[in-house]
Image (spheres, grey):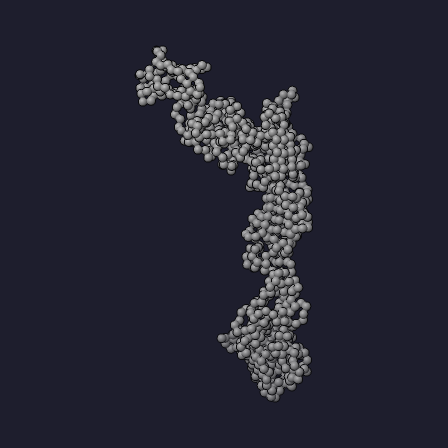
């Protein structure tokens, strides 16, 4: 407990001196004597026991809380209350017959009110007072006007009214008329934790106060349509209303707390009245964390759905993040100026309106508009005017009122999307945005589409995703007035002015020239190797397109046609449906610009799930990508047609731009990939031989790819040759493991002299133990499984059939087999053995001579076999001659016996 403090001097409570020094605390007993002390308006004083001594006077203009007793039993005492004051005494109040009392505003006495003496010499003024005494009123010392003839209501307004004082029942009935600002001061039980509650239809509303022992809790409700309080709820410190309705909005609630022990000093406490607001707006409070899907973060105590209006206000400790769990759903979304919402690898589904001031960060998320009336995306709705994915699933459609960039997928599932020239499909080093072709809606208005190039060096094969593009749309990136033209179309049937076959490349740099749908163009972006982002604008292509292609059997064009992806999305050349390839080979050919020469580059082919390169090329053709296809030999025309079924949603598909060393992600097959290059250059060319039991040795349009010759002088052309001498970059052939040897001829064409290297770049699922690379001219061979590269020097030119792959499950040491000689001679433990390799029905003779011309042996032979030469008896140099009816073969052989 505290100590007793005595006032000293006249003045305000906080300014006078006290003995002992220091203002009294709530645990101190206080005595005021000889002087007048004032508690100023707007201040609250709390003490334990209070005594007004002889000659003392207390003027209360503020608030006084006495936890114990108030004693005024001396002579010449005074106690008065101002018009805006409150006095609460938890204990008893005792006065003598000479006390002057001036009571106004609110006086609450939890104990007894006793007046001692009988002379009635004091005075009492209770004008404008609300007095409640929960104990007994006793004594004979009260003034005459303190008597009672009528029941006192607790709101005395006339000093002449004779009455008793308001008790607990009166207090309960009149409590809501007490100013809310002082209700908490009147309570001896602390009920300040009760607050107004907001809820949504179908949600819960909960009110609570602290838990006290040995008390009774009585919750009360006052409906918005009633004037009286009704008891509701259970005897508990918490009251929950389940499944609230709109009709409950405006109802008031409070709790009355009374002790179960009749001798308890604290007789009653009534909380301030609080309201229930029921509305369709669910307000984010962020009281728990940042998880959108945590119901405790929402004012309604429930997670919003597509029928819910939400508000995310300013000044909160936590703001919502939608990254785990279910997608976020709202009807209307409103956000105040500094609020934020992050959609991270998840969705925000909106069925109504957006009012967000740019506070929604959906750069790594998906926005889905799925209302039933037209939905608008206002200007500045999203952070930096960018989002990841956007889906329109609204039969009435949606539109843009301001700029919006999409970095992911735009899907028009149902309903049209009106761009008002505000939509940009973004592209960067990581991905290029696209329009999903599987939706039923249409784009209304123009769209800007970007295409990131990691290098602006040299030629790129471009196509347009729009139906109204012109050459001049490239003027910001290409010099259309260059002396050497930088923009070309390709005419497979082109002839020179003298009607001779000519290259298909045709200058096409007039700005007004239209860029045709499904046609490719060669565009030279210059000599800068820094990244560049191309932007084209127009009305996007959608639906089916077709083009008639030519095969004039020209010397230079040979049926190749430069086509292009017509859609604002990648397409799959191997799509199960959507393609018509009438009289067209199944291979596609991509161009990669040189790193050193702006006018040249290399080609990569793809067919049947296999790319000739190791990372450049595949079945996925990026948006804006041009590529070559070939009208099959023997046909003069072909038809290429495609529909939306060939479109895919591969965001990471980059424009064909540079050679890559990494392994491709193509379908795994049984194959061998070789590459060739000059030893003084990092660049190389590649060729693939793959093995299939249904592949034929000659060219097949659905299994093989021709060789398109590179134009980069620093890159050789490597290819295999089929049985008819066709040069193939991808060669499908059969391979029987039971056969002893399989031979595959190789060819190389180079445009400069140099030291070269051929190496085994990749082997997939191929079980042959030995892969020999044979140089028949130099009569050398090397097992590429042991040493994967062979080097040699070549002059500029074409080398067909000089090199070959020799595949075997057994090691081959006999040069005659390696180099396809008709026979070989081996000294085998003192015996001279001749092995001959004729066809089964082929016949011939073998003659053996010494250097003196003497015949040592003469035999007739047929087919494949072995004979022993018995005429050689000593070491030396001997001459062997094998002859058939058509040819004769001679070898000098050194024999060591």
Vertical comparison of 887 with 322: above or below: above
Residue at horizontal 60%, vertical 79%? 133
Of residue 410 and residue 400, the one placed in the foreground of this image is 410
- Percent x, y of residue 309: 64, 56
In the image, residue 98 sits, relative to residue 551, either above or below, namely below
Q: Residue 360's spot in the image, x, y percent?
A: 61, 51
Q: Nearer the viewer, residue 201 or 335?
A: 201
Instruction: Choose top left, top right, bottom left or bottom right for residue 460.
Output: top right
Q: Is residue 526 visible to us here?
A: no
What residue is rendered at 63% in x and 31% in y?
639
In the displayed structure, would residue 223 be above or below residue 707? Answer: below
Query: Outermost residue, front direction?
Result: 841
User: From this viewpoint, is residue 438 visible?
Assistant: yes
In this rendered view, identify the residue nearer to me: 479 or 374: 374
Task: Measuring from the top left, give residue 188's x and y in whole percent.
Answer: 56, 73
Residue drawn at (55%, 51%) of the image: 323
């Amino acid at each position: 407990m505290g100590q007793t403090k005595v006032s000293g001097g006249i003045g305000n409570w906080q300014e006078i001196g006290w003995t002992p020094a220091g203002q009294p605390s709530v645990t101190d007993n206080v005595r005021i004597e000889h002087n007048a002390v004032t508690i100023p308006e707007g201040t609250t004083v709390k003490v334990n026991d209070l005594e007004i001594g002889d000659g003392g006077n207390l003027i209360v203009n503020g608030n006084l809380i006495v936890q114990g007793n108030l004693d005024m039993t001396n002579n010449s005492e005074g106690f008065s209350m101002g018009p805006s004051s409150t006095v609460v005494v938890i204990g008893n109040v005792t006065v003598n017959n000479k006390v002057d009392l001036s009571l106004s505003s609110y006086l609450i006495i939890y104990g007894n009110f006793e007046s001692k003496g009988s002379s009635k010499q004091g005075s009492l003024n209770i004008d404008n007072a609300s007095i409640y005494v929960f104990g007994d009123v006793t004594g004979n010392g009260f003034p005459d006007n303190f008597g009672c003839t009528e029941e006192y209501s607790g709101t005395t307004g006339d000093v002449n009214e004779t009455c008793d004082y308001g008790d607990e029942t009166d207090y309960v009935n009149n409590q809501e008329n007490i100013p809310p600002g002082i209700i908490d001061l009147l309570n001896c039980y602390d009920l300040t934790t009760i607050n107004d509650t907001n809820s949504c239809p179908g949600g819960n509303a909960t009110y609570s106060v602290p838990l006290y022992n040995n008390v009774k809790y009585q919750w009360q409700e006052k409906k918005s349509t009633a004037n009286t309080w009704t008891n509701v709820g259970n005897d508990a410190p918490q009251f929950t209303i389940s499944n609230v309705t709109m009709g409950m909005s405006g109802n008031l609630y409070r709790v009355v707390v009374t002790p179960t022990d009749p001798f308890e000093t604290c007789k009653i406490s009534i909380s301030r009245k609080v309201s229930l607001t029921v509305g369709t707006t669910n307000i984010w409070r962020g009281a728990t964390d940042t998880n959108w899907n945590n119901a405790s973060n929402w004012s309604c105590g429930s997670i919003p759905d597509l029928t819910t209006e939400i508000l995310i206000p300013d000044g909160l400790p936590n703001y919502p993040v939608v990254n785990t769990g279910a997608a976020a759903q709202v009807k209307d979304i409103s956000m105040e100026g500094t609020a934020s919402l992050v959609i991270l690898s998840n969705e925000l589904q909106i069925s109504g309106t957006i009012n967000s001031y740019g506070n929604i960060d959906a750069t790594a998320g998906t926005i889905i508009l799925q209302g039933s009336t037209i939905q608008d995306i206002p200007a500045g709705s999203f952070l930096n005017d960018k989002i990841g994915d956007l889906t329109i699933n609204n039969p009435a459609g949606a539109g843009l009122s301001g700029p919006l960039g999409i970095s992911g997928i735009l899907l028009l599932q149902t309903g049209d999307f009106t761009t008002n020239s505000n939509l940009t499909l973004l592209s960067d080093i990581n991905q290029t945005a696209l329009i999903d072709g599987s939706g039923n809606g249409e784009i209304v208005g123009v769209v800007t589409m970007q295409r990131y190039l990691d290098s602006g060096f040299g030629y790129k094969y471009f196509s347009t995703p729009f139906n109204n593009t012109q050459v001049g749309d490239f003027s910001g990136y290409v010099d259309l007035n260059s002396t050497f033209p930088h923009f070309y179309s390709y005419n497979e049937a082109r002839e020179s002015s003298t009607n001779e076959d000519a290259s298909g490349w045709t200058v096409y740099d007039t700005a007004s020239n239209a860029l045709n749908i499904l046609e490719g163009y060669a565009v030279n972006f210059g000599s800068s190797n820094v990244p560049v982002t191309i932007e084209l604008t127009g009305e996007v292509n959608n639906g089916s397109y077709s083009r008639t292609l030519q095969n004039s059997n020209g010397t230079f064009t040979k049926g190749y046609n430069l086509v292009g992806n017509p859609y604002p999305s990648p397409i799959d050349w191997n799509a199960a449906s959507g393609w018509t390839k009438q009289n067209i080979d199944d291979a596609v050919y991509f161009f990669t610009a040189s790193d050193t020469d702006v006018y040249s580059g290399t080609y990569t082919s793809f067919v049947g799930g296999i790319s000739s390169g190791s990372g450049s090329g595949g079945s996925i053709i990026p948006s804006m990508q041009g590529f070559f296809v070939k009208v099959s030999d023997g046909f003069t025309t072909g038809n290429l047609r495609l529909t939306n079924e060939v479109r895919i949603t591969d965001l990471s598909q980059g424009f064909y731009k540079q050679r890559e060393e990494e392994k491709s992600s193509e379908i795994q097959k049984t194959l061998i990939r070789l590459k060739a290059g000059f030893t003084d250059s990092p660049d190389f060319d590649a060729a693939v031989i793959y093995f299939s039991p249904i592949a034929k040795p000659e060219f097949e349009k659905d299994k093989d790819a021709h060789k398109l010759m590179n134009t980069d002088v620093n890159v050789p052309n490597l290819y295999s040759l089929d049985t008819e001498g066709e040069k193939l970059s991808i060669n499908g052939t059969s391979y029987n493991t039971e056969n002893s040897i399989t031979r595959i001829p190789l060819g190389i064409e180079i445009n400069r002299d140099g030291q070269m290297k051929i190496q085994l770049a990749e082997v997939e699922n191929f079980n042959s133990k030995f892969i020999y690379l044979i140089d028949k001219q130099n009569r050398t061979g090397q097992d590429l499984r042991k040493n994967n590269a062979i080097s040699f020097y070549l002059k500029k030119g074409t080398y067909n059939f000089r090199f070959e792959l020799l595949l075997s499950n057994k090691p081959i040491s006999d040069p005659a087999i390696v180099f396809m000689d008709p026979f070989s001679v081996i000294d085998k433990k003192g015996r001279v053995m001749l092995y001959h390799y004729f066809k089964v029905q082929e016949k011939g003779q073998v003659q053996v001579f010494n250097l003196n011309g003497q015949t040592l042996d003469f035999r007739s032979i047929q087919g494949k076999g072995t004979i022993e030469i018995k005429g050689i008896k000593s070491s030396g140099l001997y001459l062997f001659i094998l002859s058939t009816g058509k040819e004769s073969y001679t070898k000098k052989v050194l024999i060591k016996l």
